[in-house]
């Protein structure tokens, strides 16, 4: 019998996590929504935050590559929208789309409304710099950040200037 090696969460910063956060903070990547990697047919490819994580994993792992098809999208192991288990393990995450932010302005069934990495990227209009701050908070505390959107944006500015 073969067992699947499921990713587990690791607390703290690692070289891979620093590489990922540094990539989000760089001007190397252009942000998009709805897919890991878009723009095969342009000279300016775009990625969502999980696409950046996947790209950093691919660059660090010999033999891995983006897959191309007839559309304008790239995929990794035929996945166009979330992190594969290999990428999760590389980052020490136990979720393909981890919760990064609890919005304390909105209660949902008695709890703060949680927002995933994909939701922060696609629906909440957070920049890569703000998402980098949220991932750093998750990596170093093991918990999503709890606060308002304005507090996230303010804390991210401080974080970026000190990174």
Image: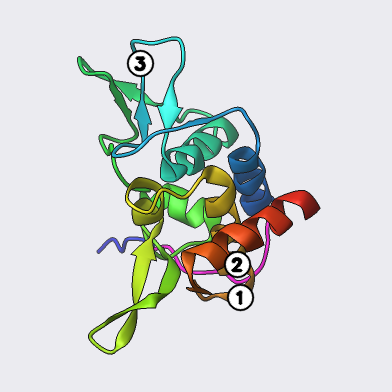
What residue is rendered at 43% in x and 27% in y? 46
Q: Distance from label 1 to label 2 (Cα)? A: 6 Å
The residues bearing labels 3 and 2 have C-alpha atoms spaced at a distance of: 32 Å
Residues marked 1 and 2 touching at CB (< 8 Å):
yes
Q: Residues within 10 Å of mark 3 (few under 14, many from 20)?
A: some
The disc at residue 129 is: none
Residue tagged 1: 141
Q: Is residue 23 left or right of residue 58?
A: right
Residue 11, given in percent of the width and then of the height, sits at 60, 72
154 versus 41 height, above or below? below
The part of the chain drawn in magenta is 6-14
4 vs 112, nearest the viewer: 112
The numbered dot on residue 40 is 3
Tell me which residue sits at (68%, 57%) in the image: 14
Residue 133, given in percent of the width and then of the height, sits at: 60, 57
> Residue 124: x and y, percent?
37, 54
Q: Is residue 10 magenta?
A: yes
Seen as rendered, the residue at the extreme bottom is 110
Local packing at callout 1 (Cα closer than 10 Å; few below 14, some 14-19, many 20+) is: few
The residue located at (62%, 38%) in the rendering is: 23
Cα separation between marks 3 and 1: 37 Å
N-term mark: 3 or 2: 3
Residue 107, quarter of picture = bottom left
| Residue placed under numbered mark 2 in the picture | 137
């Amino acid at each position: 019998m073969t067992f699947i090696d499921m990713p587990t969460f690791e607390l703290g910063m690692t070289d891979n996590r620093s590489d990922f956060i540094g990539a989000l903070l760089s001007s190397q990547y252009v942000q998009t929504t709805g897919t890991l990697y878009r723009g095969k047919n342009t000279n300016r490819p775009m990625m969502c935050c999980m696409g950046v994580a996947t790209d950093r994993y691919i660059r660090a792992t010999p033999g891995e590559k983006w897959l191309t098809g007839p559309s304008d999208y790239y995929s990794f192991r035929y996945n166009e929208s979330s992190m594969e288990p290999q990428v999760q393990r590389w980052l020490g995450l136990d979720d393909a789309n981890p919760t990064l932010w609890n919005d304390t302005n909105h209660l949902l069934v008695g709890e703060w409304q949680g927002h995933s990495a994909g939701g922060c990227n696609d629906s909440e209009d957070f920049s890569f710099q703000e998402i980098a701050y949220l991932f750093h908070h998750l990596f170093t505390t093991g918990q999503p950040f709890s606060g308002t959107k304005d507090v996230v944006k303010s804390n991210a500015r401080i974080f970026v200037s000190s990174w």
